[in-house]
Image (spheres, rainbow, N blue to C red):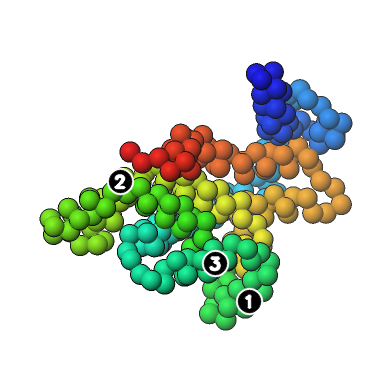
C-alpha cells in the first residue's frame, strides 16, 4: 500500500517540480525536457517584469479575490444558517431550486450576465467581477450542513439573554463554525483567484488585468518563452498554494463537518 501511495504522490508532485525547474531554465531547455535546475531564473524574472504588468495583475487578483471571498462568506453563511435554523414550509423547495443552479453551466448564462453588467455600467469594475459568484449554491449547502450540528439550545439561551438574531449569528454561530469558514474561504479564494473566463469577458481595460489573464497573454504571438511563462505560472500558483497549506487542517475539518 505504501509503495502505491509513494508512486501516486510522486506523480502528483511532479508537475509542481517541473514548474519550479522550468522557471529557472531558458525556453529551449524547457522544450527539450530538462529536469535539472538552471541558471536563467533572474533573466526570466527581468523579462517577465519588463514586458508584462505583473504588479498590476497581482494587485488586481488579490483585490478581486479577497473582496469576493469576504462577501461570499458573509452572504452564503447567512443563507445556509437561515435555511437550517428557521422553519418555513417552502424553504426546502426554494433550496432545491437553488441547487438546480449548480447544473447550469456558466457559459449558458455568460451572455445575459454580460449584457446585464454592461447595461448598469459595471464593466471594468470590482463589483462587476464579484456579483455573479457572490452567492454559490455549493457554499450555501456546506454552511447549511454545518448548521445542522449547531446546538439549538445555544440559540434559545441566547434569545433568553436578550440577543437578537444577528447577534446570535455573529457571536455564537461564526466562532463555532470556524473550520467550515476556513474550508469555504479556501474554496472561494481559489476559485476567485483562478477565475479566467468572466474577467476576460468584462475586464476590457488593460489596467484591470488579472494573473490568469496575464499568463494567457504570454502564450499569444508567434514565439512563446516557456521559461518566462512557467515563472508567471509559478507566481500565479503561489497564493493559492500558500492559502491551502496554511488552512489545510481546518479545510479538512470543515469538509467533514467537524464542530468544536
Front in this rendered view, residue 85 or 64: 85
Q: Is residue 46 visible?
A: no
Residue underneath mark 2: 175
Q: Residue 181 at what x, y percent from top left? A: 41, 47
Q: Residue 250 at what x, y percent from top left? A: 43, 38
Q: CA distance from mark 1 to mark 3?
A: 11 Å
The quarter of the image holding the N terminus is top right
Left or right of 160: which side holds 56? right
User: Quick one: label 2, few (<14), some, or many (20+) residues within 10 Å?
Assistant: few
Q: Which mark is residue 185?
A: none
Q: Is residue 111 visible?
A: yes
Say which of marks 2 and 3 sits in front: 2
Residue underneath mark 1: 112
Q: Residue furthest bottom?
A: 119
Q: Residue 63 at what x, y percent from top left? A: 49, 55
Front in this rendered view, residue 93 or 248: 93
Left or right of 38: which side holds 60? left
User: What residue is at 47 percent from the left and 70 percent from the top?
Assistant: 94
Left or right of 3: which side holds 151? left
> Mark 3: which secondary structure?
helix
Q: Residue furthest left?
A: 161
Front in this rendered view, residue 93 or 188: 93
Residue underneath mark 3: 132
Residue 111 in which image quadrant: bottom right
Which one is earlier in the sequence, the residue at label 2 or at label 1? 1
Amino acid at each position: 500500500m505504501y509503495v502505491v501511495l509513494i508512486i501516486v504522490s510522486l506523480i502528483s508532485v511532479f508537475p509542481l517540480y517541473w514548474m519550479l525547474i522550468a522557471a529557472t531554465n531558458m525556453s529551449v531547455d524547457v522544450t527539450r525536457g530538462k529536469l535539472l535546475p538552471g541558471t536563467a531564473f533572474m533573466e526570466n524574472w527581468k523579462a517577465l517584469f519588463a514586458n508584462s504588468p505583473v504588479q498590476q495583475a497581482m494587485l488586481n487578483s488579490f483585490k478581486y479575490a479577497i473582496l469576493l471571498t469576504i462577501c461570499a462568506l458573509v452572504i452564503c453563511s447567512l443563507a445556509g444558517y437561515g435555511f437550517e435554523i428557521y422553519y418555513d414550509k417552502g424553504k426546502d423547495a426554494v433550496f432545491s431550486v437553488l441547487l438546480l443552479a449548480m447544473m447550469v453551466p456558466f457559459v449558458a448564462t455568460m451572455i445575459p450576465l454580460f449584457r446585464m453588467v454592461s447595461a448598469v455600467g459595471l464593466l471594468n469594475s470590482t463589483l462587476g467581477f464579484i456579483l455573479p459568484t457572490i452567492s454559490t449554491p455549493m457554499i450555501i449547502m456546506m454552511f447549511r450542513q454545518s448548521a445542522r450540528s449547531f446546538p439549538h439550545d445555544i440559540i434559545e439561551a441566547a434569545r433568553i439573554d436578550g440577543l437578537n438574531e444577528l447577534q446570535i449569528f455573529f457571536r455564537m454561530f461564526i466562532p463555532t463554525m470556524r473550520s467550515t469558514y476556513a474550508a469555504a474561504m479556501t474554496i472561494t479564494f481559489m476559485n476567485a483567484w483562478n477565475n479566467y473566463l468572466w474577467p476576460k469577458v468584462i475586464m476590457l481595460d488593460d489596467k484591470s488585468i488579472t494573473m490568469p489573464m496575464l499568463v494567457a497573454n504570454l502564450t499569444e504571438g508567434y514565439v512563446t518563452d516557456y521559461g518566462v511563462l512557467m515563472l508567471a505560472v509559478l507566481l500565479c500558483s503561489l497564493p493559492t498554494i500558500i492559502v491551502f497549506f496554511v488552512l489545510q487542517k481546518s479545510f479538512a475539518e470543515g469538509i467533514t463537518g467537524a464542530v468544536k
